[in-house]
Image: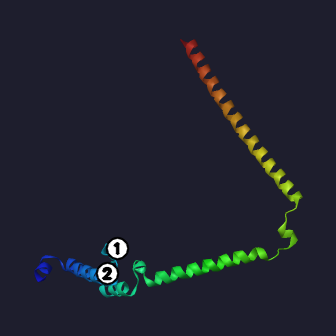
Amino acid sequence: MVRLRRRMSMGLALRRTLRQKVQNARMLAGTPIRKLKFDKLLNTTSVLHTLQTSSPSNITKPPSEKSFNEQELSIKRENKQEDEILPLIQLPIWLQEVPLENDQQSMKKEKKKQEKKEKREKKKQEKKEKQEKKKMEKKEMKKIEKERKR
């Protein structure tokens, strides 16, 4: 072991001992070694501690992160309960039903908007066509002028 440490740099030797300790702890905890993930920020003691105290499903998550996720789930559950309660509360009549007149007016407005858009598009197309015609006429005029010069 001493010879190996002399050959390798100290960092590699430390990694190797860390790996061995974590594997031993995993075998004691009863989790497969394949799941081994090293975090450079964790010390050996903290890795061993989390492995020995936690169940195999919780090994990848640090305890603080797990509790945060549980808090989120509880908040989501509360929100769902509130959403279920809200329809039971009666809204004022003017909020519950939209009168038909307003629907018809909004439909008319939408139709007008669509018609305006179509008109704009038609105008744009007409302009493009006119420009193309002008270009073609200019080209034809240039050709005719060249032929006259010859």
Three-letter amino acid code of the residue under disc 2 = Arg
Three-letter amino acid code of the residue under disc 1 = Lys
Q: Earlier in the sequence, mark 1 or mark 2?
A: 2
Counting from the top left corner in percent of width and height, residue 57 is at: 42, 78
- Residue 141's place in the image compared with 109, above or below, is above
Counting from the top left corner in percent of width and height, residue 94 is at: 87, 69
- Disc 1 and disc 2 in contact, CB within 8 angstroms: yes
State the residue at coordinates (73%, 77%).
85
What is the CA distance from the residue labelled 1 to the residue labelled 2?
9 Å
State the residue at coordinates (66%, 31%).
131
The residue that disc 1 covers is: 35
The residue that disc 2 covers is: 26
State the residue at coordinates (85%, 63%).
98
Looking at the image, residue 103 sits to the left or right of residue 37; the answer is right
Provide the secondary structure element on which disc 1 rests: helix
Counting from the top left corner in percent of width and height, residue 140 is at: 61, 20
Q: Residue furthest left?
A: 3
Looking at the image, residue 22 sits to the left or right of residue 100; the answer is left
